[in-house]
Image (cartoon, rainbow, N blue to C red):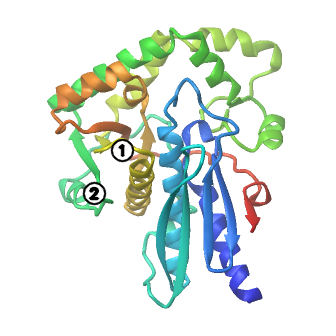
Amino acid sequence: MEKHLSDLYTMSTYAIKAPSSHNTQPWIIFIKDNGFEIYPDFSNPLTIADNSNRELYISLGCAIENICLAANEKGYGEALTFILNENQQVNVRIDLSKGTANPSALFSQINKRQTNRSVFFDREIPDKEITKLTNLKLDEGVKHFIYKYNATEFNQIRSFVREANEIQLADDRYKDELLSWIRFSNSQINQFQNGLSYKTLGVSIIPPFLRKIIIKSQLKASAQNKADEKRMQTSSHFVLFTCEKNTPEEWIKLGRSLQRFLLQTCKMKIASGFLNQPCEVEVIADKMKDCLQIENRHPAILLRIGYAHPVAYSPRKQASSIIFNK
């Protein structure tokens, strides 16, 4: 029994490596005798950037996929149950069964995967690699669309990124929320163990007396669009993840699919970064849906992929603050 519980704890720690918007790490995990109960953590919501909690649930799905891959690695199969609680929030129960699964090659990529916000190498991903990513198995209700650099759809998305930046960075509430998650120094990183560190943003430590000056100069649509244009110009492809029903259960399934995609790109030495702005601004998402002719599906996650140098990893909370015994 002690070995079994130790295995469960080890499996659950892989959830912490999942991506999340602003690196909020919005998950709570309870270990029970034959599996886990996973809860979304609404204690620090992104009420402006993610007002529907869609990205929160997608992140929950990414964390769940990591746990399932870790369970498969130890020979366990998994069965998921979605539970709607009294607050209309969706929790997930994972029941494990020994000897019913085979390990996945993606498991070894969990600790290597990272979100890359840097300018890429301006090198195209070969068609045969894109075919592998196109044919990747996704969960029910989830579909992804891959657009090559300078294709009509790629350039349309480019314009939607710029439009979304204009809207978001004209909103003081959005800027205040973003600022609250930026960690400007090592002491802040150690204190919070979450958020967007200066290292992952690719900047130097910012002294306290300079922070407001630098923030005011950078948190403008013109500056953001200039930076994003460099990122987009050197990207090989965009990848748009969409869902059919736009429900929390489907968002979780999208997160599982997204995590497998990210781990597969990592395995293929392909860098990935998020450009979710057009999905976060409803009016832009609606325009994107119509313009791209994506079968009336809902845009949820936008990635750029290509080749790049590795970057710093985001800070992570201690397991003891996220994982509990039940």
Q: Position of residue 21 (x, y in %)?
A: 55, 38
Quarter-of-image position of residue 44: top right
Q: Nearer the viewer, mark 1 or mark 2?
A: 2
Question: Pointer 2: residues within 10 angstroms few (<14), some, or many (20+)?
Answer: some
Which residue is the site of mark 1? 305
- Of residues 291 and 146, the one nearer the viewer is 291
How far across and down, in percent of the image, does residue 76 sit?
52, 83
Residue plotted at (60% across, 57% down): 17
Q: Which tag, 1 or 2, sits closer to the chain's start?
A: 2
Is 324 on the left or on the right of 99, as rendered? right
Q: Quadrant of the N terminus?
A: bottom right
**Does 34 sit left or right of 131 as displayed?**
right
Residue 150 makes an appearance in the image: no
- Residue closest to the eye, 308 or 182: 182
Asked if the residue at tag 2 contacts the one at tag 1, i.e. Cβ–Cβ closer than 8 Å, the answer is yes
Q: Residue at x 28, y 62 (%)?
A: 136
Q: Is residue 208 above or below residue 16?
A: above
Q: Residues within 10 Å of mark 1 (few under 14, many from 20)?
A: many
